[in-house]
Image (cartoon, rainbow, N blue to C red):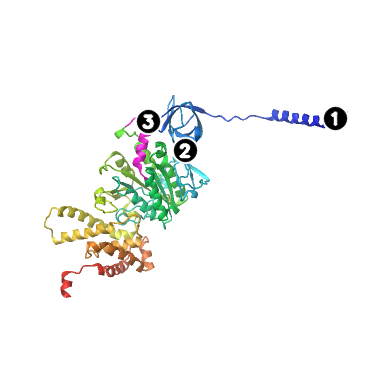
Amino acid sequence: MPANPFNKTINSTFELLARGRDNYTPSFTPREVGSVMKVSSGIVKVSGLPGVGFEELLEFPGGLFGIAYNIDEDEIGAILLGEDSLLNAGDEVERTGRVMDIPVGNSLIGRVINPLGEPMDGKSDIAFKQRLPIERPAHAIMDRSTVSVPLQTGLKVIDALIPIGRGQRELILGDRQTGKTAIAIDAIVNQHDKNVICVYCAIGQRAASVAKVIANLEEKGAMEYTVVVATEGNNAPGLKYIAPYAATSIAEYFMEQGRDVLIVYDDLTHHARAYRELSLLLRRPPGREAFPGDIFYIHSRLLERATHLSDELKGGSLTALPIIETEAQNISAYIPTNLISITDGQIYLSPKLFELGILPAVDVGKSVSRVGGKAQLPAYRSVAGNLKLAYSQFEELETFSRFGTRLYADTRKVIEHGKRIRICLKQQELQPMSVPEQIVILIALTDGLFDTVPLNKMKEAEMALQKMNIELSPDVVNRIISDKELSSPDREVILKLAENTLLPFQEKSESDQNDM
C-alpha cells in the first residue's frame, strides 16, 4: 500500500515539537510580591519585599502607586500617590525596581498636569520621549556660574528696589490674602517676550484658585510658554509632597537644554504640612511644632536645584520663586526662617499696606535681594539707590508727623516726595511694565518732576509718561535695556521729554500765579 501523506505530516510535526522541546530553555522573571498589612490616610504598611530600596516605587492593585519611605525590619511604610479608598489589608503589592519619575519635554508646554504626569486639562494624553526622576542631586558648585542677568518681573517696586536675577531663589512671604500669588503670576506674564519657560506648581491649593490662575495665564497668552503642575486641597498628602520635586525635574529638563526657566512654588507652607502629616502617620519622631527633624533638608534639597549653569553646560538657568504663608506677620516662625536662610533674599508683603490699598503690598524695609545690583540693569542702578533712601526717610518721617508736630519746610518736602514715590510704586495686577516705561517714570520721580503734581493727578501723569515712551528713539531704548550705564545725554533727553509731558499736570506755584 502507498504511504499515507497524512501520517507523514503528523510524524514531521511531532519531530519538530520534540526538537523544539529539547532546544527550549525556560526563562524566569522573578517577581517580588508582598501584601498590605494596614491602610491609613495617605500611607500604607506593607510586609514582605525584602529587597525593596528606599524611595522605590511600589505598585498596588488598580494602578495605584506608592513610594517606600520607611524600610524597617518587619514592615515597610509607603506613601500613597493617590486615593486609598479601594485598597484593603491583604491586597498584593509588587516592586517596580524604579524610582518615581515624571515625563519631560516640549509637549508639556501649555498643559496642566498632576505630579504623576497625567493631564488635568481634559486634552489628549501627553506624548513624551523621556522621563526624569523627581529626586535629582543638585548641580555641583563647579557646574554653576554667577547670577548676573536680570529676570524682569514687570513690577517697578521689585525690578528697581529688590531685583531678581536668573538663577536666583527669591522667597515671597506674607500673611494670607496679601497678594503673594499675584506677584508670581505677574512675573510669569512678563516673560512673554523674554524667551523664558515658566513652570507654575500649585501645592494643595483650592481648585477654584488654581482655575483662576490658569484662566489669567490663558487670557494673557502666558500658557504658550508655561507648564502647570497642580495638586488640589483634597488630594492625597503624598501627591502634595512630590509635586514640587516633579515640577523641578520638568524645569531642569529645559534648563539643561540651555533655556532660562522660572519656577513658582505656590506654596511651600502646604508642602511642609503635607510632609508633617505623612511623617506623623509613619511614626517618625516629631520636633518643633510637630515637624520632623529633616523639614529643613526637604526644602534645601529642592531649592538648591535652582541655579545658573556654566557655559560649558549650555548656560541655562532655573530661577525659583517659592511662596510661604506667615501667620500674624510672624516672619520669625519655624518654616519662614528656614526658607529665609535657604533663599537668596525675600519679598515681604505687609497686610497693613494691603489694607491701605498699596498694591503690590511690598514692605521695602523688610525685603531684600542678596544678589542686589549685580543682577540689575545699569539703568536701574542709577536711580535705585536714591529712590530707596528717599523712601526709607519718608517712612520714618511719616510716622513722626502723625504726632502733630510742627514740621520744617525741608521735612514737609521729603514727606511730599515720599508720598509720590509710594503712588508711583503702586501697580495694578496683571499689568506689568516694560523696562523703558519703568526707567522713564523712575528717572522723573528721582529728579523731582512729580513733586509739583497733585496727588489726585499722579496716576494720570504716570500713564502719560508710559505713553511718552514711544517718543524715545530706538537707540535710546536699546541703551536703556543694554548692560551699559545710561549716558548723561540720554538722561537729559528723557528728562526733557518727561518735563514736557508732565507740564499739564503740575500745579502752578504762588509766584507763577501772581505773574499771571
Q: Secondary structure at mark 1?
A: loop
Q: Position of residue 437 (x, y in %)?
A: 33, 62
In the picture provided, is 370 more to the left or to the right than 109?
A: left
Q: CA distance from mark 3 to mark 2?
A: 21 Å
The residue closer to the viewer here, 209 or 131, is 209
- Residue 100: mark in rendering: 2
Q: Secondary structure at mark 2?
A: loop
Q: Position of residue 260 (x, y in %)?
A: 42, 52
Quadrant containing the N terminus in the rendered view: top right
> Looking at the image, which residue is at 16% across and 75% down?
515
Q: CA distance from mark 1 to mark 2?
A: 65 Å
Residues marked 1 and 2 touching at CB (< 8 Å): no
Q: Kindly report the secondary structure that dominates the magenta region of the rendered protein.
A: helix
> Looking at the image, which residue is at 15% across and 53% down?
402
Q: Secondary structure at mark 3?
A: helix
Residues marked 3 and 2 touching at CB (< 8 Å): no
Q: Is residue 43 magenta?
A: no
Residue at image mark 3: 281
Callout 1 crowding tier (Cα within 10 Å): few <14, some 14–19, many ≥20: few
**Precedes in sequence: disc 3 or disc 1:** 1
The mark closer to the camera, 3 or 2, is: 3
Amino acid type, residue under disc 1 in the picture = Ala
Span colored in magenta = 265-286
The answer to whether 424 is drawn above or below residue 228 in the figure is: below
The mark closer to the camera, 1 or 2, is: 1
Q: Is residue 281 magenta?
A: yes
The answer to whether 398 is drawn above or below residue 501 in the figure is: above
- Residue 448 is drawn in which quadrant? bottom left
Residue at image mark 1: 3
Q: CA distance from mark 3 to mark 1?
A: 79 Å
